[in-house]
Image: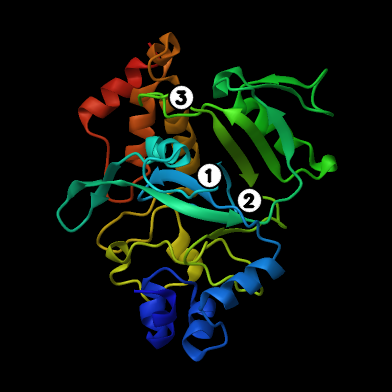
Amino acid sequence: MGLLSLAKKSVKELIEEGYPESVAKKIADGTLPMDEASRQARADAMGMTGDRFLRGHSANVRPKSDEDMFMVKAETDGDFPGSKAHGVAESYARGGEVYDEATDSYLQVPGEITPLRHNADNLFHVDVGGDDYSGAYAHVPGFEGTGARVGSDDIASAVKQQFNNGWQGTRFEDMVDYFNNSASPGHPTDIYNILGSRGEVKIRHADKAAFDPEYNGSNIMGNADPRLLAGVAGATAAGLAAPMIKNSGMISAPRSETLFDITMGARDLERRLEGSPASLLFPSGLVDYLETVNRETEDPNALTRVMALADFL
């Protein structure tokens, strides 16, 4: 079903598909035509890049426009399964468990790949020369000392801290970047870290976004899973775009968004360390404990508490 069919849907149905309420109303009343030519014209007016990018992620933690994120640039011949870019994104599309309040159990949720576009045009450039992400090297002007940084994460972090340079992200040219537990064919691609936290930077769903120039929220428009929105059709765009969708009978919202962000960052680091000696030092028991206590409907059991304590011993 094409995007043109969206005009025939009610505001409620459009919200259930993930569109912010303000945007859903404009689609429904025809203010925002969803034919490809109209969408493209609005995207061009917003300064969105003509390139497509792919981000692999857990299905219950979807991209938001106001967050910093790594993504891989799709090749000129598309982002189809089997392409180098798709392979990189697929390696990060990791499934995971979400707590199901209705059955008081955990559900396995598959990972996803979301196609994206953005308007970031002032990027710090690093030529990695075919090496992997751990070998990326750059001097970031203005950063501590000489600004020398090693590894894509450290470089991207240093670039983010240099507000005066106006950088909106980092382009890592010819870099091998695969989830550590994946069998990497060693094909270098162009990896981007886009700073959605910069107020002027917009990230949108490449295929479903309405590209409403008046919308400045975090919802990338159109990537929500209707299965996870049962009972919350009247929620606001912010609610629909939350990392863990509000208590809907499917997913339990975290007690603390800050703690949720910390544990998600820790899990990302854990993925990076897999297969290396440093992984033996990772406090996985502690992170399990923090994730559990942050769920509104669950308390850590005895084993979880013991494993957390063991990380301190």
Q: Earlier in the sequence, mark 2 or mark 3?
A: 2
- Amino acid carrying label 3: it is Arg
Q: Nearer the viewer, residue 288 or 43?
A: 43
Earlier-in-chain disc, 1 versus 2: 1
In this view, which residue lies farthest toward the left? 103
Q: Label 2 sits on what residue type?
A: Gly
Of 217 and 137, the residue lying toward us: 137
Q: Earlier in the sequence, mark 1 or mark 3?
A: 1
Residue 253 lies left or right of residue 54; in this view the side is left
Mark 3 and mark 1 in contact (Cβ < 8 Å)? no
| Residue 120 in picture, x, y percent from top left | 70, 51
Q: How far apart are the two marked residues, 1 and 2, measured between alpha carbons?
A: 22 Å
Residue at numbered disc 3: 272
Marking on residue 160 = none
Q: Where on the picture, by quarter, is residue 82?
A: top left
Q: Is residue 241 above or below residue 184?
A: below
For label 2, the residue is: 196
Say which residue appears at 45% left-offset and 32% top-offset. Answer: 268
Mark 3 surroundings: few (<14), some (14-19) or many (≥20) residues within 10 A: some
* Residue topped by disc 1: 75
Is any part of residue 304 visible from this angle? yes
Q: Residue at x 25, y 48 (%)?
A: 99
Q: Residue furthest bottom?
A: 29
Q: CA distance from mark 2 to mark 3?
A: 22 Å
Residue 305, position as x, y percentages in the image: 28, 27
